[in-house]
Image: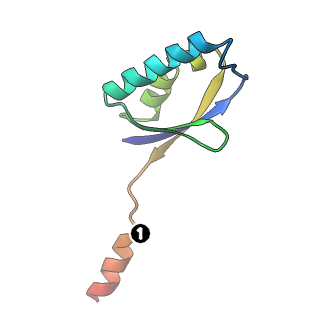
Amino acid sequence: MKILATETELKKLSAYSDKEILKEEARAVLELQQKDILREIYFDENHCAVLILECNDKTEAKKILSELPLFKNGYISFEIKELHPYTGFSRLIENNIR
C-alpha cells in the first residue's frame, strides 16, 4: 500500500549546530530508500518533507517513521494517509459502452 507522510516541524533545526542529527537522519532515510520502503521524498515550499512509502498499512508506516532520528528527538511529526488508486476513469469507460 502506498502511504503519504507529510512532515510537520516541531522544533527549529540549525544546519550548523544540529548537523550530526541531520546526518543521522539522512543515513536513516537512505536506508529506507535502499530497502525500497521509501519510494519518493521531496521538500515542500516550507522545507518540510513529503514522503511516499510502500508499507502494509498506516500502522507499519507510523512504526517506521517513528524510528527516524528527528522524530525520536522531537523535532518533527508526520501526518500519515493511505493512498488508493483513482477510480474516476471507470465512469468514462461505462459511459462509452452504453
Numbered label tally: 1
Picture quadrant where residue 44 is located: top right
Quadrant (top left/top right/bottom left/bottom right) for the N terminus: top left
Seen at 64% across and 25% down, the residue is 76
Q: Which residue is mark 1?
A: 88
Q: In this image, 59 relative to 75: left or right?
A: left
Which residue is at the front of the view, 41 or 94?
41
Q: In this image, 94 relative to 21: left or right?
A: left
Which residue is at the front of the view, 14 or 67?
14
Determine if residue 62 is in view: yes
Above or below: residue 56 compared with residue 68: below
The 10 Å Cα crowd at callout 1, few under 14, some 14 to 19, many 20 or more, is few
**Image location of residue 73, percent across then percent down:** 63, 13
Helix, strand or loop for disc 1: loop
Seen at 38% across and 64% down, the residue is 87
The figure's colour scheme reads: rainbow
**Image location of residue 27, percent across then percent down:** 44, 17
- Residue type beneath disc 1: Gly
Picture quadrant where residue 64 is located: top left
Picture quadrant where residue 40 is located: top left
Above or below: residue 6 compared with residue 11: below
**Image location of residue 20, percent across then percent down:** 57, 10
**Image location of residue 91, percent across then percent down:** 38, 76
